[in-house]
Image: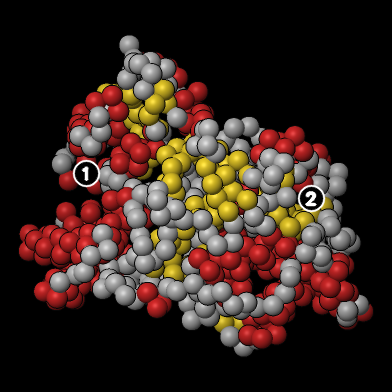
Amino acid sequence: MSYLWDLSNIQPRTEVVLPGDTIPAMFWQAVERRGPNVWLRQKDLGIWRSWTWTQVGQAVREIGHGLLAIGFGSRETASILSNTNIEWVLSDLAVLSANGVANGIYPTDAAEQVHYLCEDSRTTVLFVEDDEQLDKALEVRKGLPQLRKIVVFDMEGLRDFRDDQVISLDELRALGREHAKTHPKALDERVAAVSPDDLAILVYTSGTTGKPKGAMHAHKGLVYTVRGYNTLIARDDNDECMCFLPLCHIAERMGGEYFSLYTGAKLNFVENPETVPENVREIAPTVFTAVPRVWEKFYSGVMIALKEASRTQQAAYAWAIGVGQRVADLVLKGQEVPGSLKLQFRLARVLVLDNVRKLIGIHRSRFLVTGAAPISPDLVRWYLALGVPMLEVWGMTETCGASTGVPAERIKPGSIGPAAQYNEVKLDPTTGEIMVRGPNVFMGYLNLPEKTAETIDPDGWLHTGDVGVVDEEGFFRITDRMKDIIITAGGKNITPSEIENELKFSPYITDAVVIGDKRPYLTVIIMIDQENVEKFAQDNDVPFSNYASLTRTAEVQQLIQDVIDAVNKKFARVEQVKKFWLLETQLTAEDEELTPTMKLKRKLVQQKYAEQIEAMYR
């Protein structure tokens, strides 16, 4: 046992928690076994509303029968265009229970993208969140002859709206209740007809290298993987989890919805993406999974708050985090923590560190999970110094989520851990590409057999496109994407992600794209953290009128230069950034430069800002 955390709370579980060989079979088993227990919670008008398993089952049954009532056939596809909320989960489980295929669409997608995804997936029923998403559907429906019905979750603002193709979710549930009276066994028969080999869900890739591709996952792959997750990161029905990442992304669909369905852990939905910091403090999750950008935001919030603290508070934090870092360093090395240092750490937690954890909302967390993008090793060490283990997992849409994971008893910052028990992972001996094989690997890309053949070789190995190394203990480390490796004009191979991660550790930088392929030196395009940089400007009386003018001020330019200078000291001369340019537009997930998971698209950024890049090399 480590002094920082109790490993008995994190040990993997190998037994089958819930029977069933398809997602709907497992779900209805869960409803029967856990009936009165709370599963889902969502804040509505300032009040947290709880849903028991029985209530969820009733809603899913009504929606499922409603789908049958409007003619939804077996193996047809229904798409869900909505932010993450309970209605998303209810609709998903109803579609699967009706022996259909469920497809998610990002709420930030434009109407043109909605058209492409519905057309490619042959969507017959489209669930939309509200009037904003309905507008997109109405704009493109003429080009979707197979689309029969549009179901709206929230009818606010649509009270007087009338359209024969559009109904509310409440109306669909009412149709379902009537259908169940005349066909009481119809939905159960559909559930029983679902085969483990049937296609269950489509998860479209972000489309950074072309049009999005629909990754197909069968029920047997989902069930196999979700059971495997418990051998990687254990949960049970005592856990409180937070659901806030997009459910159409594999991370939240598997690690949030389906993993909680399997284990019985409570799933709490945030009000909206902007209220995550507030909601996490209310929920105080015992297990918290997020992407690096969230962990970076929490860290920068603490750093900014610290600058406003008194000198006494700053000194207390410096001492306490110093003690935590000394303990963390010893634990990471596998060395014994002396009794005197343990005593200091107890005091540091009581006086300071527990308050920092409460400020973030992780004071009840047994462990934190990070994935979906590389994270700075220094950030992992910082959370360890607070006394909370951060476990990095790695995987992709095509591997049904996590394929490797760092074990709590052997954390290595910068590593993605060894292969999970439920799949094989190896390096291509020629290119160093990470390859994965196992029942969790997807069925292929919808309508794209040639792309599937390029991705999965005849021996069943999935070519991930990530380049990595593996150490003597079997721990993998990602060095970069194959297509992202930079070869400078001098012939030096450079992995930009390492430099970018160091830059993003600064509270003033949200994202960065390092440039330098076939160039004489490295440059970088940077997206600043608006909130923190504006605070810096206000504190230092720096005048600015808007976001663009903020990025152009000499003081902000020097602020970012200082960050780059500090990062450059960690790298060899050839790997140092010589010039930078700040994006002058505040980007959101609706902008084409960002993926739905808020990562800059390297290729598109380089194309769109080619003129600014060339200016840095003149």
Q: In the picture, which quadrant includes the C terminus?
A: top left
Q: Position of residue 135 (x, y in %)?
A: 68, 47
Q: Residues within 10 Å of mark 2 (few under 14, many from 20)?
A: many
Q: What is the number of the mark on residue 459?
A: none
Q: Which quadrant of the figure has residue 355? A: bottom left
**Mark whose residue sits in front, 2 or 1:** 2
The answer, for residue 106, to whether it is visible in the render is: no
Residue under the image location 42 percent in, 39 percent down: 479
| Mark 2 lies on residue | 123
x then y, percent, for residue 276? 43, 61
Q: Position of residue 372 (x, y in %)?
A: 49, 50
Viewer-proximal residue among 496 and 133? 496
Where is mark 1, residue-wise? 536
Q: Amino acid at mark 2?
A: Thr
Marks 2 and 1, Cα distance to the nearest angstrom?
48 Å
In the visual, does 155 lie left or right of 304? Answer: right
Q: Is residue 135 left or right of residue 6?
A: right
Q: Quadrant of the N terminus?
A: bottom left
Q: Amino acid at mark 1?
A: Phe
